[in-house]
Image (spheres, rainbow, N blue to C red):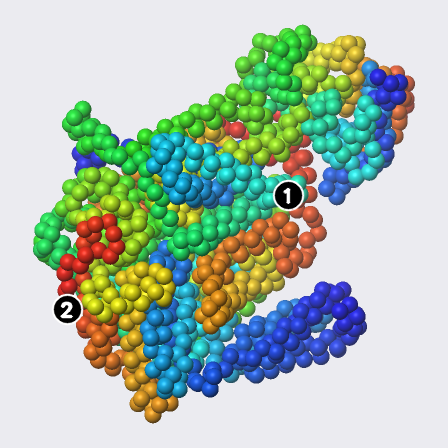
Amino acid sequence: MLAHIIQNLPQVLIDGLTLGVVYAVVAIGYTMVYGILELINFAHGDVFMTGSFIGATVLFLFMGMGFLTALPALIVFLIVIIIAGIATGLLGVGIERVAYRPLRRKNAPKLIALITSIGISFVLEDSVRFIAELKTGNYIVTAPSIFNHRFTLSAHDWFPFFNNATFQGSFILVLAVTVVMLVSLDLFVNKTKWGMAMRAVAQDRDTASLMTINVNRVISVTFFIGSALGGATGVLFMIQYGTIDPYIGFILGIKAFTAAVLGGIGNIRGAMFGGVMLGLLEMFAAANLSIITHGAMGAEYKDVFAFIILILVLIFKPEGLFGKAVVEKV
Amino acid sequence: MTSLGALFNKIAESKRNQIILFIAYVLVTGLGLILLPDSTVAFLLLLFSILILYYIDFNLKAKWITGLVILAVIVPFISSFSGSYQTYMEVGTLVGIYCAMALGLNIVVGFAGLLDLGFIAFFAVGAYSYAIFASGQAAKFMPFGHYPLPGGTFWIFILIGAFVAALFGIILGVPVLRVRGDYLAIVTLGFGEIIRILLNNMDHPINITNGSMGIASITPPNFFGISIGSSSQFYYIALCIFLVVIYIVRKLENSKLGRAWKAVRDNEIAAQAMGIPLVKTKLAAFAIGASFSGMMGVVFAAKQMFVDATSFTYLESTIVLVMVILGGMGSVPGVILGAAVVIILRTQVLTNISNWLSSLSATYGIPIPPALSPEKMQLLIFGLLLIIFALYRTQGLIPHKNRKVDVARLERESAELAHKASSGGADS
Amino acid sequence: MTETTAKNFLKISKIDSYYGQIQALNGIDLYIDKGEIVTLIGSNGAGKSTTLKSISGQVRPKQGTISFDGIDITKKPAHQTALLGIAQVPEGRRIFPRLTVRENLQIGAFSEKNKTVVSERMERVFSYFPRLKERLSQKGGTMSGGEQQMLAIGRALMMKPKLLMLDEPSMGLAPIIVEQIFDIIKEMNKEGMTILLVEQNAYQALQIADRGYVIQTGQIVLDGKGEELMKNEQVREAYLA
Amino acid sequence: MKLKKMVPLAAAVIIVLGLISGCASNSGSSGGKEVIEIGSQSPLSGSSATLGDAIRLGAQLAIEDQKAAFEKKGFTIKLKDLDDQGDPKKGVANAQILASDKNVLALVGHLNSGVAIPSSEVYEKNNLAMVSPATTATVVTDRGLKSVNRICARDDFQGPAGANFAVKTLKAKKIFVIQDKTAYGSGLAEQFRDQAKKLGAEIVGYEGITVGEKDFSGVLSQAVAKKPDLIYFGGVYAEGGLIIKQARQKGFNGPIMGGDGLDSSSTVQIAGDAVKGVYLTSVAGDVTKTEKGQEFAKKYKDKFGKNVESYSAYGYDSAAVILKGLMNAINDNDGKKPSREQVEKAIRAVKDYDGVTTKVSFNDKGDNTYAKVYIYNFEQAKYPPVQKAEISQ
């Protein structure tokens, strides 16, 4: 039994990492918005989904115009990801303007903002579904595949107790792009003036406004960055898995939120770790649950475990595994 | 139009005229339904009389009796002339089921201010508790007893469903209440998903729920030898439970517990300071809200004669939430109206418009893409309703009446007070 | 600068402000000339902080006007009044707990793009509060109350304000530290800074103030020179006993 | 006063009342001819919309083909198509709608067994005959309802047929089974597993996945690591296509097999080149094999601008069986409009109907005695796949 689990480990780690970095970047969107507004932005998962659809559309357009053969795939990909990122960033800013800012002005209870965010998520899902169906008659969209060379990681040659692992070219791309995104975000938040302003607004909105900081603008910037990252990740998801539908945002959003909670909500580095950890755990559970439980519980229980982790962390360590205990503002 | 309105106002000023107008309305719409038995609009207009009744200046007791007569006698009687009799009664039954559920959620969200996004789990628990024992399913894991249980046990199961659901409410509540307000939403969502996944997977190692195959051939209820199978019969069951639920909610609203809920909702810290036991109060809300759902789950299982996990998704939980928000959080008549509107919208209006559109495209060859069908737009419509109501009409269709304090203000003030206290005392 | 703006550098006329439904200010009139220290004293909940917040734009008055340096700022949001040169040291200090001391100071000069100007200002803050220089990389939340107050004032000075408003700087601090802080306030005023000081600690406030206002349940009930107010029977009874 | 609010309300009511009195109710006749409607219920939205839409269009084509014959008898036949969304509750609600419309005498439906089971309880009460082109779960007909018929094969025929092929023809000794935890996928996978075991193959794994997800690497690494000779998937193309693709990416080059849920052009679209070497069992025959079928495919394409899906012809044949029964019932009823009971009996009594893809005779449970299972292989990455075998009961 144990031998089996160990043999498979390299493959599980690679797959877990792929899924984990996707969770991580989406988790950052949740954590940034929560940090600054103390609001669970339910619509964020659907912003991610919208990003993947925008990416697919642009890719199809490029293909139609023959760019895909004329330009190196990497450049096409970068253009697509930037366009999708900007579009979803603007979408995020729009959502904030329409659905959250009026409530903030009215000082409405948090419950209400949560409800509007659920509403926004429904509207996004259905609008994308509608457009996709109108175009293709079927809302499951299969993207043109690029970067699908296969590589083999010969773990077996180095350590005989491992099996070899294989991965797609897109895996490297996903990993590289997310690392670039995460590092530049970290630098932005911790080293730049606007990053400092964001942190200040997150800690004390009223006082930040006394420092000549336009709080609404900082919130807009936060939404832009969080949503743009989410949308760009949507493109990565599309490249990695090839097929998207309007409902991918829901499950993935909940998982990403779990990751954010795991890492300590409001904590950007925590969200990164939380995401990668959750991806690894989930992949490990899917690959090994039935081996461990002798068939009593199969891979279908992996989500149950994800939710149980979420609930346990929220109950016993609400500041997250990497978060510092912050005295709650009552 | 305005002069017409003024005239109407003048007539409606006297109580007697109001009653006459109301009776006339019921008669006209009733007659309308008899003459146009297949017109859904006529049926809806007849139902609409209940809302008018609510707004009339009338003795409260008389109102209740009139309402009951309309719902229990006039509506079923008149629609029995129609070929759509069973459809109408099916809609009526669904409205009853969802009204009770929405009232349950209203206790949790509207009264106690706890956002529950996994409410459908309790409905599922109720439905499965009847389904398992009223079909051959129980025989697969129970070492004793004969299954399926006879239809007469249905009536006991309504209570059992309520009890089991309440138990689950408490099981969920105990750990969850340690969690802060907005985290609660996520935790309950997770809980709802866990229940659904478990129901879908508990066919091995021990087959309890029959997994994704669902449980079929559930014994219909039996009422003194009469097997209850048609929607028109379930309509009365739903109506009875609905009345019981309203009675309980009305009683609770004005009880000590009801006031405690509202105090907790409006200001948790102050409520605690006044000596309200937070945990007990919140648990009571969870348990009572869940029990309504559980009861209706039993009815649902008996009516469908088949249950599987696909009926209990996150979407269903949010639909119940839409009912509460649309009607008005904390407002009992509002929530009832909200449930009715959503169900009628889902099962009647959208379907009819879709069918009309597709017939239009069939007969006149107007190409209307199926993606445009309003029936498929449900998510969009409910999403927009949530946003619009949350932004512009937080108090819902029928606002909660005895709201004397402005919640938002109270919250802000208490926050300020607390802030003052903490910042004043924290340093030395 | 014209005579009038130097005279009524800040002028508040007849403002009414609300917290939700509750009226917190009821027709407040107040002015500050350039270079003055003016103090606003009153008991808890009298409307002192609300007056400051109305000036800085955190609370929007329902009626009345506020002008500063000849500009109407009644309806300006907080970040814009701050840009005009009004700095507020809020009640309870409200420093950013998870930013370092350096970042707390830098954020005070958020609108200043020139980096050398920022470091010049920081040096100036250190000349008032040398202790801050020692703690530059410490997180704001880990400092003692007195240090936090210094940081809060320093942060306000980073804006190079024309008017400095301090909300209860002495609250919760040890007497020695209060002494120090008031000394620094006096010193800053001598160097030309206009100051509006809100205090519950009326004795010390009136000692350093040129003029004072007494506020009670949202209304100004008394005003006059610092020493006059100190001699006033009513004031002595209510605030100096 | 509250009544102020009532004024616009009352005004609205009056307007609406006026409107309905103005509208004529839909009568049972049109142009002097009596209307008979054939219902159809299938998912027109949701993840299996491709399959559901094919059923609807097939039925529509059958009705248009035979319109003239019924016109001669004095009847106008129409299709009343409803979207069951693959949701049991919606299916039941739609069933009520069909049952309450007196012009509806029978229906074509459903795609999903989970929807067909509760909905058919309503049909049974209303003597509304149902002919299903695609529901394969055993329970559907095993309840012995007189209104329920199907022209396709059952899971306990399709699953074992797949297992026979896998073990005997493909010589698979170690099999890894994945299923999607839906009524359809589980049912089929279970039947396959049991038969494969009986034939002596080793089931090295039996795992469930979550519908709607896109990453199945976890389950697949487990599967690939166990080095099976064949991977079987019980489920629908949305997940199936991805499983095929990801299994190939993980270096699994052996055969992958699935049920009729993969029998769709979308499988090829999603899986791309990886689809080569995939086998599938289907209850639907390859229309392009027969001349009749080719003709049908051409007509379908001309009419709807879409290529035939496997269930297009089954939708067509289901509707055609209904129409045949209906015609018999009309003839037996002296050319008058028959009652639902008569239609129900006449449909069950249909013998040796020769359709586009299948012959139809119902047994006493309502199963088609001529139902066959076909085995296909994707030799190239294009739809339809190549038919490899045809298995009769």
Of discs 2 and 1, which sits in the foreground? 2
At 64% from the left and 27% from the top, the residue drawn is A213
Q: Amino acid at mark 1?
A: Pro
Q: Secondary structure at mark 2?
A: loop
Point out residue D203 in the picture as x, y percentages from the top left corner.
16, 49
Contact? badges 2 and 1 (CB < 8 Å): no
Q: Position of residue C125 (x, y in %)?
A: 66, 11
Secondary structure at numbered mark 1:
helix
Q: Which residue in the protein does label 1 denote?
A: A102
Q: Amino acid at mark 2?
A: Gln
Rendered image: mark on residue D393? 2
Q: Is residue B420 above or below residue B79?
A: above
Q: Chain of mark 1?
A: A
Say if C212 sits above or below B398 in the image: above
Using the image as rendered, state which of residue B151 and residue A16 is in the foreground. Answer: A16
Residue A108 lies left or right of residue A55; in this view the side is right
**Which residue: 23% across, 43% down?**
D247
* Residue D301 seen anywhere in this rendered image of the structure: yes
Tell me the quadrant of the picture where the C terminus of chain A can be found: top right
